[in-house]
Amino acid sequence: MSKPSLARGTRDFGPEQMAKRTFIFDTIRRAFQRYGFLPLETPAFENLSVLMGKYGEEGDQLLFKILNSGDFSGKLTDPDWNEGYKALTGKISEKGLRYDLTVPFARYVVMNRGTLAMPFKRYQIQPVWRADRPQKGRYREFYQCDADVVGTDSLLCEAEIVMLLHDILPALGIEDFTIKINNRKILTGIADMIGAHGMEGPLCVAIDKLDKIGKEKVEEELIQRGFTSESILKLEPVFSLSDGTAPFKELKNWLSGSEIAMKGIDELETVWKLVKTLGLENARIQFDVTLARGLSYYTGAIFEVKANNVQIGSISGGGRYDNLTGTFGVPGISGVGISLGVDRIYDVMEELNLFPESRKTSTQVMISNFDEEAFLYGLSVLPKLRNAGINAEIYPDSVKLKKQLDYADRKNIPFVILIGSDEIQSGLLTLKNMKSGEQQKRNASDIIALLTAERS
Amino acid sequence: MSKPSLARGTRDFGPEQMAKRTFIFDTIRRAFQRYGFLPLETPAFENLSVLMGKYGEEGDQLLFKILNSGDFSGKLTDPDWNEGYKALTGKISEKGLRYDLTVPFARYVVMNRGTLAMPFKRYQIQPVWRADRPQKGRYREFYQCDADVVGTDSLLCEAEIVMLLHDILPALGIEDFTIKINNRKILTGIADMIGAHGMEGPLCVAIDKLDKIGKEKVEEELIQRGFTSESILKLEPVFSLSDGTAPFKELKNWLSGSEIAMKGIDELETVWKLVKTLGLENARIQFDVTLARGLSYYTGAIFEVKANNVQIGSISGGGRYDNLTGTFGVPGISGVGISLGVDRIYDVMEELNLFPESRKTSTQVMISNFDEEAFLYGLSVLPKLRNAGINAEIYPDSVKLKKQLDYADRKNIPFVILIGSDEIQSGLLTLKNMKSGEQQKRNASDIIALLTAERS
């Protein structure tokens, strides 16, 4: 009988929020479909063997693990108990909740590669779960909207991601955004050029923080991570280049000695060209040599999207990976993808007041319940409304009209039909506009025509 | 590097299945909305205190439990380890996966009752998880589609559920179905009348099996469950009444001595009358005094829907409950709801071949990729198609045309645009119908008009 509560870091989505979230999901889904992506859904839980080791050690810790069913502890011995929770976990748990949509997608591609038409373009809109410490804007359950193409290394796919974002964000009302782009090959080349071969990993982690902590602190971190002062000195061009507008020429001069860096620059130039050929003249794209992204599996272009003038992290990110299925024994399937974060997009839209007012999915008209006779009459009108595709309900109880109108108000129902003895005799029902208060007498088919016009 | 696999009892839904499932979900959602139900989503996992004890002892066992994060075992002592897995579970797990949509809904209502407009009509379409032994047609992850009204005991709600099912099932193509209806009050009254007061629980369990095991075996089970042969003899009318067509009159004669049974019959008669008033002349409803339903919380009408001529269990079920929120300390909120099982509906539709052929959500046209010049020309056509709302893609790699057409075929893309040097010069593109093989030369805007007309 205790007061119930939500599990930490989770949320209910009531009707108001659902209407807004559905608007976001529908807009994204529709765009994914226009670009030829096909839908996929994978199970909420996967075998831990599929998930473990794919997200780094921290990720392994943040996986929600499911306790084995039945007598999970019966066969364990004293030494098992004393091994500590990490070793113990593997003995009492075999499944974990989905942590992102990319690894399950790679698993799906590997298991179905015999029947998939390659290149395979899929979208996936599902929740993921992470045992992070909950805080403002960070939840333990949140949705991701991913679109990926695998089985081709065509740079058109990168250009199409740029196009897709230019379709989706303005359709949501987010006009002022920047897509930052870099290429991992350039970062690899830079590591080579500064005499820190193979150290692009820690290099990325450090310079990714430039925005937040500034140049000096980045340099301090680099020293801590084992870079020599000579290397750091050679890194100077990165900081002067970092302010956008595709400074590919200067970059080429600097990095002409690195084959891989030159390939990365060439790839980006092709993407810029293809975006233009696709008709996007003023693309909101910006080269940022300090963009690094956390995940280790990227090998080519990387993306990150920010809504300008809103204090919030990136609302989308992605990139190209050349060997994601390799961890499942099938190497050589290149892919590129983008992930949109619905929760942050929701927050941006709330802050900028971008949600449209119309709610085509909620009730459009309520028939009031005056007395038994009017109720029965109302019941004969109700199916006519619904058959015409109008969302309609009748108040189920015979209570005071004020209470019924109050219900309609709270549910944001824009019209109420009032039926009394006059109305039953004449067949002319009173249609009340709940916003203006205006009332008019119309027969049922006129009301249907009026409400249908109102809806579209 | 081991071969990846799905967790037992779970499934991926690839593009083909997603299209079909989406058709079912959209049809159900649209109907729920037309009836004035509003959307709700609750988290995948709940505190175990919310879930435990709500589904009977078997249900408690079938809940998927989530291992606590971090060092879950550090504070446990030897006696803890030796208590057995049931007691241990409570010490290393605090959360469980959603088992149905009803209990989380009751939790939501209790937590938000101050702000909800009552009566509250909500629908909820989400997966649930049960650690059942997987078998044909039974999965560990499956979707439920629920609609419930709480905060009113108006029998109109029961009648609306009947209407709703008559809307949804034919819209899915399932015309031949039967809604079996009973009322728990009648079963309570029968238990009283046969001298087995308070034993309606075991009575329900036993007679619910009549269909499967026959009258004799039911009687055997009743004896095992402690019913006297005298009681069983008095039960005779149940078996002769069980073949439908609203035998309310006979029932009233038999049960006139039981106030609660008479109330149950009266309620059903009202539902029958309301359904008629709502304009449903030949409702596919059948009274079935042997319908009992497993769940213990029902207190009034109970429903179960079968697709006729298909060997499969019920595709929908529900009923009225008077005290679901009582377990959370808030008694007195009556409600009634229905749950549709998407997996069984899917199977019925497959067996009867009811899925519509049109797939408005997948790619409608692919632009082939002949050579660099044609590719660039194609890139200028592509955005025009998408801007017109047409799902379109261009083949990203320059490979043999046969391979490209094969891709379009496998992806069920109905049209392909072929671009060669002729086409670039004339501006007349070749549009190939992949089904008929027919080809025609048209300019881009004609193609857009043609494909738009084709789609609708």
Image (spheres, coloured by chain):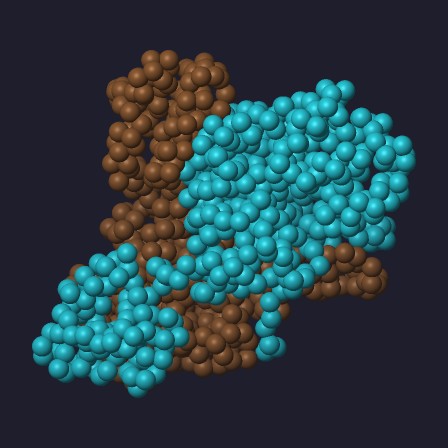
Chain colours: A cyan, B brown
Q: Is residue A196 left or right of residue B164?
A: right
Residue drawn at point x = 32 percent, y = 79 percent: A405
Q: Position of residue B229 (x, y in %)?
A: 39, 73
Can you tell which quarter of the image residue A246 is in?
top right
Q: Quick one: quadrant of the C terminus of chain A? A: bottom left
Q: Do we see residue B54 in this rendering? A: yes
In the image shown, does A193 or A161 lie closer to the viewer? A193
Q: Is residue A443 left or right of residue B187?
A: left
Residue drawn at point x = 39 percent, y = 36 percent: B386
Q: Is residue A323 above or below residue A390?
A: above
Can you tell which quarter of the image residue B219 is in?
bottom left
Q: Do we see residue A98 in this rendering? A: no
Number of marks drawn? 0
Can you tell which quarter of the image residue B44 is in?
bottom right
Q: Is residue A219 above or below residue A443?
A: above
In the image shown, does B431 or B332 lie closer to the viewer? B431
In the image shown, does B111 or B305 lie closer to the viewer? B111
Q: Position of residue B183 (x, y in %)?
A: 34, 72
